[in-house]
């Protein structure tokens, strides 16, 4: 049970992953199948694993935000939460980039290289949705390369929240004129120092990227307010015209 738990803790198995078939997994772990079943039952009781109707055993999505959670509801209803969320990302991801530059192995760098190249391909295809999804994968790969288990799981939770658009719609960033080119440039500025083993530059680049996201979000918020005011003026003008 501890071995299974360690695989989840270290990020080797992530929420949604299906475990290998019982026979194969028992052989990999050098244990009997009854011992493996007993271990799986322990982790099911802990809420880490679940057996589905197809007979497979899966890692539970224990990082998903609960929309019935009172704290989540309060955060969503607070207009300043989106900016706070990005500010928190800056704190976490700046340090993730720093430690990734210090600790990344050849295998980690290969994963990062694959993510960044996929991002470039999506950019060339002019596919903002795919590019945004790879963006999230890229930041998660950096967290994995930091080799800090706590940081990794905090980042996994943040990426889930980011993908779900709980606090803000990240696609808005990609639809602004010139933003996609600038975002790719910023990701390259994070990627290159990590690959070169320059932790200070990697941290600065990650923080600069999130500062830009904050600025765009503030601009979008101001733009939305202007739109609302303009619509109210239009409604008032139309009402006056009807009275004439």
Image (cartoon, rainbow, N blue to C red):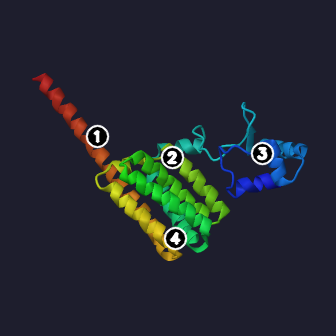
Q: CA distance from mark 3 to mark 1?
A: 48 Å
Secondary structure type for disc 1: helix
Say which residue appears at 46% left-offset and 59% top-offset.
117
- In the figure, is residue 203 to the left or right of 237? right
Say which residue appears at 62% left-offset and 59% top-offset.
152
**Which residue is label 2 attached to?**
163
**Which residue is label 1 attached to?**
228
Q: CA distance from mark 2 to mark 4?
A: 24 Å
CB within 8 Å, label 2 to label 4: no
Rendering coords of residue 58 (x, y %): 71, 42
Q: CA distance from mark 2 to mark 1?
A: 27 Å
Camera sees residue 72: yes
Quarter placement of the C terminus: top left
Q: CA distance from mark 3 to mark 4?
A: 36 Å
**Which residue is label 4 attached to?**
194
Q: Which label lies toward us, 4 or 1?
A: 4
**Which residue is label 3 attached to?**
46
* Placement of 17 over or under 234, stated as above or below: below
Rendering coords of residue 238 (x, y %): 17, 29
Secondary structure type for disc 4: helix
């Amino acid at each position: 049970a501890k071995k299974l738990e360690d695989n989840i803790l270290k990020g080797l198995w992530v929420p949604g992953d299906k475990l290998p078939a019982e026979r194969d997994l028992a052989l990999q772990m050098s244990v009997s199948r009854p011992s493996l079943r007993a271990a799986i039952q322990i982790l099911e009781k802990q809420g880490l694993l679940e057996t589905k109707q197809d007979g497979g055993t899966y890692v539970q999505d224990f990082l998903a935000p609960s929309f019935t959670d009172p704290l989540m509801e309060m955060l969503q209803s607070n207009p300043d939460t989106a900016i706070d969320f990005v500010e928190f990302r800056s704190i976490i991801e700046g340090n993730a980039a720093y430690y990734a530059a210090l600790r990344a192995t050849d295998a980690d760098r290969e994963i990062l290289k694959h993510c960044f190249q996929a991002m470039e391909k999506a950019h060339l295809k002019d596919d903002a949705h795919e590019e945004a999804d790879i963006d999230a994968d890229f930041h998660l790969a950096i967290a994995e390369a930091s080799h800090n288990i706590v940081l990794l799981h905090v980042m996994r939770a943040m990426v889930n929240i980011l993908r779900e658009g709980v606090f803000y719609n990240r696609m808005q960033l990609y639809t602004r004129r010139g933003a996609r080119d600038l975002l790719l440039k910023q990701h390259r500025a994070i990627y290159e120092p990590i690959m070169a083993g320059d932790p200070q530059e990697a941290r600065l680049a990650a923080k600069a990227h999130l500062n830009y996201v904050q600025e765009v979000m503030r601009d979008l918020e101001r733009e939305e307010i202007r739109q609302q005011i303009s619509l109210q003026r239009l409604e008032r003008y139309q009402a006056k015209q009807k009275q004439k």
